[in-house]
Amino acid sequence: MASAIGERARAVNPATERGRGRGGLKQERALRTRAQVLGAAAQAFADKGFPAVTMLDVAELTGMTKGAVYFHYPNKEALALAVTEEFYHRIARLGDEVLGLELSPLDAVTELMTRTAVAFRDDLVVQAGARLQIESTLIATDLPRPYVGYTELVTTWLAQAAEIGELPATARPEAIARVLISAFFGAQHISWVLDNRSDIAERVQEILTTVLPTGRSAA
Amino acid sequence: MASAIGERARAVNPATERGRGRGGLKQERALRTRAQVLGAAAQAFADKGFPAVTMLDVAELTGMTKGAVYFHYPNKEALALAVTEEFYHRIARLGDEVLGLELSPLDAVTELMTRTAVAFRDDLVVQAGARLQIESTLIATDLPRPYVGYTELVTTWLAQAAEIGELPATARPEAIARVLISAFFGAQHISWVLDNRSDIAERVQEILTTVLPTGRSAA
């Protein structure tokens, strides 16, 4: 996790491209620290929710001083924004990974949603991002809008599935994509409230089997 | 709304059964006030979310003193609990109303979910309850668990639908009910974040058409 965040920060900071001199090492240390702060913030937001988290909580989780945390992020809103952006980055990366597998369109949808379920269950940054999204009206900064790119990707696959006969020609890809993603979002939330997401993978399989008319396309 | 809350409060308060003397009128006024406070709390919670609401906000919305609000509810947690209970009460009442219509099982499911969508869009107590449920981890009191009774009712109808051939005999009522309710919950939340729930009725129709294999039962 730390390295992924580090790589991302490096990509937007041209200073790190200057080589491995004394300044380069210093930069790397700064990026590592920044990633550590972000990881601690994710843990705090996932556990306690935005309103209850303080900058001191985050500092204590990293073992740094409050000043060190403030050096990287001026306030709690900046931390929430950074965690949310990393959340969307990871969800988008799942899409890229599944695209790379070159599965059939319906298998791709199934694989993406299964991987997303696992991420919601196991990845602290994703859990924090989902919670921050839900708490976004309590956060005095604009967070990215949810689920737009993800819905587009699933819609594209479903349209391809309809084209090649994996779905009935009458299927409406956009509607199915919206329903799948609504159901995913609802299931992960209900599963979180009732059971700390322990059954999320099972719930998502159930959604896929119920919503996708697999096997019906040939009928 | 006020009268519904009043009736409910009366039902649990035997003192109001003592007749219409001077004490009875006083009691009625107290119940009306209590209902007013609850309505104001619903508005505040729906608009600002639990963490941002103060007892003073609620007092100002009713035009009462803070002391008058505290007389009815000792703290913000008590108000949140009362609003959440009223939210569940209203959702349960939708179920009773639809049962009274004696529709076919699948039509009953459709009617209940459509009415629920309208309530989420138009009823401040329902909006507040949904938001409090989402914020429940931020509230230092136990709220009722979500969606359990509602899921049971929908499951019963779907099982009846399978029995009389409105659904394929292979349909799994419990799975379909869970998916429908997850999708409803997700759709109302996404619709709230993106668009203040203006398209919730349309989204719920889409869920019903996509998930319920209507017309396929005969195939």
Image: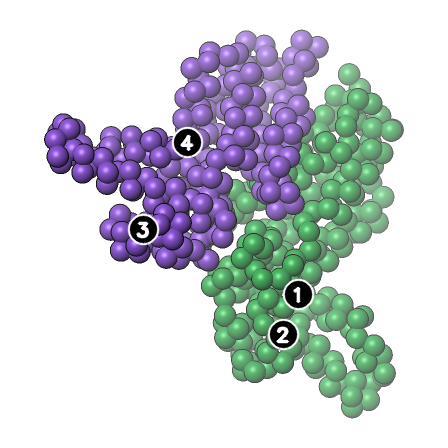
Chain colours: A purple, B green
Tell me what residue is drawn at x 73 percent, y 46 percent.
B148
Q: Tell which subunit mark 2 falls on.
A: B
Per the image, the residue denoted by label 1 is B82
Q: Chain of mark 4?
A: A
B55 to A68, vertically: above or below: below
Which picture quadrant has residue B139? bottom right
Gap in angstroms between the C-alphas marked 2 and 4: 44 Å
| Neighbour tally class for label 1: few under 14, some 14-19, many 20 plus, Cα within 10 Å | some
Q: Quadrant of the C terminus of chain A?
A: top right
Residues at badges 1 and 4 in contact (C-beta under 8 Å)?
Answer: no
Look at the numbered discs 2 and 4 and tell me whether their residues touch, using CB distance below 8 Å.
no
Q: Amino acid at mark 2?
A: Tyr
Q: Position of residue B157 (x, y in %)?
A: 81, 38
As measured in the structure, the alpha-carbon distance from the residue carrying label 1 to the one carrying label 4 is: 39 Å
Query: Do callouts 1 and 4 point to residues on the same chain?
Result: no
On residue A90, the disc is 4
Q: Tell me the distance, in whole angstroms, between the alpha carbons under discs 3 and 4.
A: 26 Å
Give the label, 3 or 4, closer to the camera: 3
Q: In the rendered image, which residue does mark 3 sit on? A: A64
Where residue A84 appears, as percent x and y from the top left, is 40, 42
Please tell me how crowded label 2 is: few (under 14), some (14-19), or many (20+) other residues with Cα within 10 Å.
Answer: some
Task: Kindly report which numbered mark, 2 or 4, lies closer to the viewer in this rendering.
Answer: 4
What residue type is disc 3 on?
A: Met
SS for tag 3? loop
